Amino acid sequence: MKKKLVVLTGAGISAESGLKTFRDSDGLWENFSVEDVATIDGWHRNPALVQEFYNKRRAQAFTAEPNAGHLALAALEKYFNVCIITQNVDSLHEKAGSTNVMHLHGELSKVRSVKNEKLIYDIGAKAIEMGDFAEDGGQLRPHIVWFGEMVPMIEPATDVCLNADIFAVIGTSMQVYPAAGLIGFVADDVPKYIIDPHIPEVSSSYKNLIFISETATVGVPQIAKQLIQDFQ
């Protein structure tokens, strides 16, 4: 039986495919305030601005291509039962060929009704505007988990981490909760790899930590070879 490899990915892996992160420049996300475009309060204040912002991001993400980090993770499915838990809202893992991807913070390519969060539509790269409605008459909004909203996928993600045989963290500052707390649900005896050029501060209470101070495009192919060597 294949070992269960659970991978938590963050903005760092997408940044190497040209998608900017809001942590790059003092809380500005492509010249927008995070409070204006990535919070539920921002949506209530100026929904048209939020729609415009995500329309641009959706179009940008649609043209982005997976990098060596994404491709290495997809290739590991030949050897492991790989589950990717991503904080990213792009579809680069899927484009690379990964088949088991859990999006904690939603997906850019999807929109949903403001009246029913389960009424979701896949729109690809299309733009949505104020006045575009779901079947139930609710305004369509990005299918994104903003600051100030619940993270509905965190419980399934926790269950996945509890059953990990190997755990890896790639390209995340480990500052955004509840995602940053997932490592705490991984058993002490499970090897844990953290791959990032700027190694995040992680509690010394976690056991079996291995740090790789590299970007995703360099570090993930490296660790992929090591995992195949060590666990096959």
Image (tube, rainbow, N blue to C red):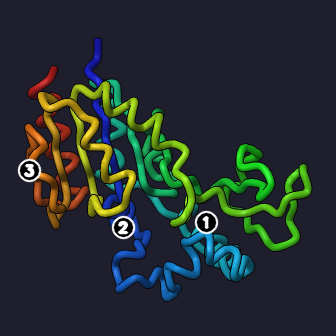
- Determine whether label 2 and label 1 are within 8 Å by CB: no
What residue did someone put label 2 on? 15
* Secondary structure found at label 3: loop
The residue at 47%/80% (across/down) is 29
Q: Is residue 171 above or below residue 205?
A: below
Q: Which image quarter: residue 217?
A: bottom left
Q: Which residue is mark 3?
A: 204
Q: Amino acid at mark 3?
A: Ser
Closer to the eye: label 2 or 3: 3
- Vertical placement of residue 58 versus 121, above or below: below
Residue 133 rendering spot, x and y as whole percentages? 87, 60
Along the line of sight, the residue nearer the viewer: 176 or 51: 176
Tell me which numbered mark, 3 or 1, is placed earlier along the sequence.
Answer: 1
**Which three-letter amino acid code belongs to the residue tagged 2?**
Ala
Asked if one can make out residue 121 in the rendered structure from this viewpoint, the answer is no
Q: Amino acid at mark 1?
A: Arg
Circle 1: element type: helix
Question: What x and y, as percent, mark residue 123?
Answer: 72, 55
**What residue is at 52 percent from the left and 80 percent from the top?**
35
